[in-house]
Image: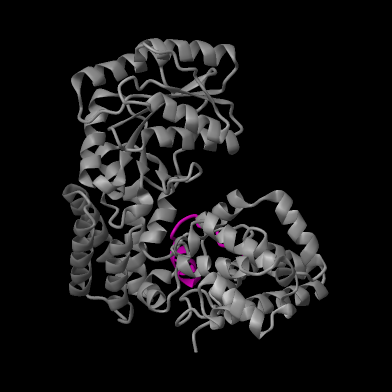
Amino acid sequence: MFEALNERLTGVFDRITGRGALSEKDVAEAMREVRVALLEADVALPVVKDFIAFATERATGEEVIRSVKPADQVVKIVYDGLIEMLGGEEPVPLNTNANPPAVVLMAGLQGSGKTTTSAKLALRLTKFDRKKVMMASLDTRRPAAMEQLATLGKQIEVATLPIVAGESAVQITRRALTAAKLQGFDVLILDTAGRITLDEGLMNEVAEVAEISKPVETLLVADSLTGQDAVRTAKAFHERLPLTGLVLTRADGDGRGGAMLSMRAVTGLPIKYLGAGEKVDALDVFDARRVAGRILGQGDIVALVEKAAQDLDQAKAEKMARKLAKGQFDLDDLAGQLQQMKRMGGLQGIMGMLPGVAKMKNQMADSGIDDRMILRQEAIISSMTKAERKKPDLLNASRKKRIAAGAGVDVQDVNRVLKQHRQMADMVKSMARGGPKKMQQMAAMLGGLGGGGMGGPDMARLKALGGGKMAEPSADELKAVQDRLAGLGGGQLPGGLPGLPGFPSKK
């Protein structure tokens, strides 16, 4: 997400960071490059003009000229401008405060991911807000649209309105409202028919549905990969339908980010959620501060911790804690950690949330540090017998050759995994001897990455400059993230990670 924009902006700030005082010419050159970066990211031209005017006025003011570190102050100004462009400091929550059932109407073009997003939203409301949710498909045009929503409902264990052939969207709406009210549902999500264009008949239909259901939220689902087309669609829908918010899908594949950066400014509507993956739990609450941090290469430790917490299996975590207390950590435990990494978005997904890693993208690729590494390590452990996984000391030369052949790797790769396990097992034993405090640190590392917010010296520097309400993790929590990722990388990350002291470097 935002790879191209992050690379351009990071380059701009790197060039001015080494300078003591900044002249107006320096600021003008920097802002010119920021403008080009935003235009290349497909941000709407009026939005870019307003942003540059805001940033230039602030950057040539007295607070920058007299600042001890003018370059840092310019970074802070751009950070503030991005937050303003994206909708302000605080996320806008979904409104479900209404006499049950609170109706959420989903609208959008065909193919934007509306049905899948309906299911993702239902899961989030059920799992995190403890709401009793029903979904109903009003899409009578697309083949198997109703069946798709019913299948997703079964998958996430959320009720769906039974399908009755031949009903119109208006009839389905009335039946859904009655069923949801009689059965005591808190929220009713109505998945309307997608339209290929802003079809007059379909727009009249969704307007009639809105009039009958009186939704507390009308969300437009838009594909962020369509760039400015998504912005134009949102504007056109909003003129015909009283939208209350936006959901951007495929945000994880959007390397430019133009739609996201333009949506709020052009439509005046808050972005409420980001769809960041194909899985049914891949829906994130939109937070302008965190998105701005990622654009400027500051990472998003908050999202990393949230992903870890969501994927944490409580029963397995408790079982792991009991083993750790005894100083035990075998290769099955290491395999479990690898699987959790995959559930959290893989190595690349996690690295993208850590401060400063974007600068090292090419080095990481050259060193072969990617998600294939996790798959390779899993294959090696899977090629071992149960006894070998429990007792790695059994692995002599002939067994290692057999495992390497079974996993399709070299013996050297097997040795690397064993070395990684040995280092982690030694650390577990050491912490087990260190008492309860040490074990809490280990639990943070292996049981869900602890809690906290965005961190690293760069983010702390922004905060010191008045960068807003950004919670920082404790030293133990941040160190836990570093150690865990370092272990998975075999301690072979090139050059160390900026802003994360103590991360092993390649010698």
Quadrant occupied by the N terminus: bottom left
Task: Answer above or below: position of 201 versus 20.
Answer: above
Q: How is the image coloured?
A: one colour
Q: Is residue 387 visible?
A: yes
Please name whichever residue, 140 or 56, is drawn nearer the observer in this view of the structure. 140
Tell me where residue 69 appears, x and y as whole percent: 37, 75
Please name whichever residue, 252 or 70, is drawn nearer the observer in this view of the structure. 252
Task: Answer above or below: position of 388 versus 40.
Answer: below
Write the residue at 30% across / 42% down: 223
Please tell me in which quadrant of the rendered image residue 164 appears.
top left
The number of numbered badges drawn on the structure is 0
139 sits left or right of 174 in the view: left
Please name whichever residue, 404 or 151, is drawn nearer the observer in this view of the structure. 404
Tell me where residue 207 appears, x and y as whole percent: 30, 17
Write the residue at 61% across / 65% down: 382
173 sits left or right of 477 in the view: left
Per the rendered image, the range of residues in magenta is 456-474
Task: Answer above or below: position of 206 versus 127.
Answer: above
273 sits left or right of 49 in the view: right
Please tell me in which quadrant of the rendered image residue 92 appears.
top left
Question: Is 383 inside the magenta-drawn segment?
Answer: no
Tell me where residue 5 appears, x and y as whole percent: 29, 62
